[in-house]
Image (cartoon, helix red, strand yellow):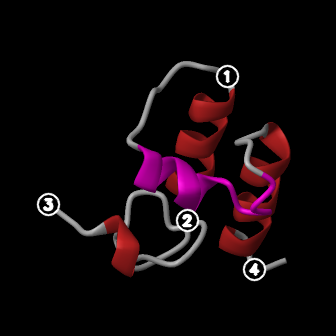
Amino acid sequence: KYDAAECQKGDVNCDGEITAADARTTLRISAGLESPADEIRTLADFDSNGKVTAADARKILRIAAGL
């Protein structure tokens, strides 16, 4: 179990790295396929606009890819 408050923005699974898995989870949240706790939703809301969208997933994936 992890403490989402100690995780960086974009590290949705809170494993210490921003990876494609984080982008995938963010995309699933944006599509309504997952209903995470508020803390996880905050990590997925990369641009901090109050909504988890495909744009958040794209930004997270770009970081994961080193772009």
Give how far across and how far down residue 24 sits, in percent. Answer: 59, 42
Tell me the SS state at disc 1.
loop
Q: Say whether residue 33 is left or right of residue 50.
A: left
Q: Residues within 10 Å of mark 1 (few under 14, many from 20)?
A: few
Earlier in the chain: of badge 3 and badge 1, it is 3
Mark 2 vs 3, N-terminal side: 3
Cα separation between marks 1 and 4: 25 Å
- Residue holding disc 4: 66
Out of 28 and 36, give the one closest to the viewer: 36
**Residue located beneath label 3 in the image:** 1
What segment carries the magenta color?
A: 38-49
Q: Do callouts 2 and 4 mark residues in contact (Cβ within 8 Å)?
A: no
Q: Residue at x 72, y 59 (%)?
A: 61
Residue 31: numbered disc: 1
Q: Amino acid at mark 1?
A: Ala
Of label 1 and label 4, which has the lower sequence position?
1
As measured in the structure, the alpha-carbon distance from the residue carrying label 2 to the one carrying label 3 is: 19 Å
> x%, y% of residue 59?
80, 61
Rendering quarter of residue 67: bottom right
Judged from the image, the secondary structure of the residue bearing numbered disc 3 is loop
Name the N-terminal-most of marks 2 and 1.
2
Residue 28 can be seen in this image: yes
- Using the numbered discs, state the Cα–Cα distance from disc 3 to disc 4 in whole angstroms: 28 Å
For this rendering, which residue is in front, 38 or 12? 38
How far is mark 2 from mark 1, CA to CA? 19 Å
Residue 26: which quarter of the image? top right
Q: Which residue is mark 2?
A: 19
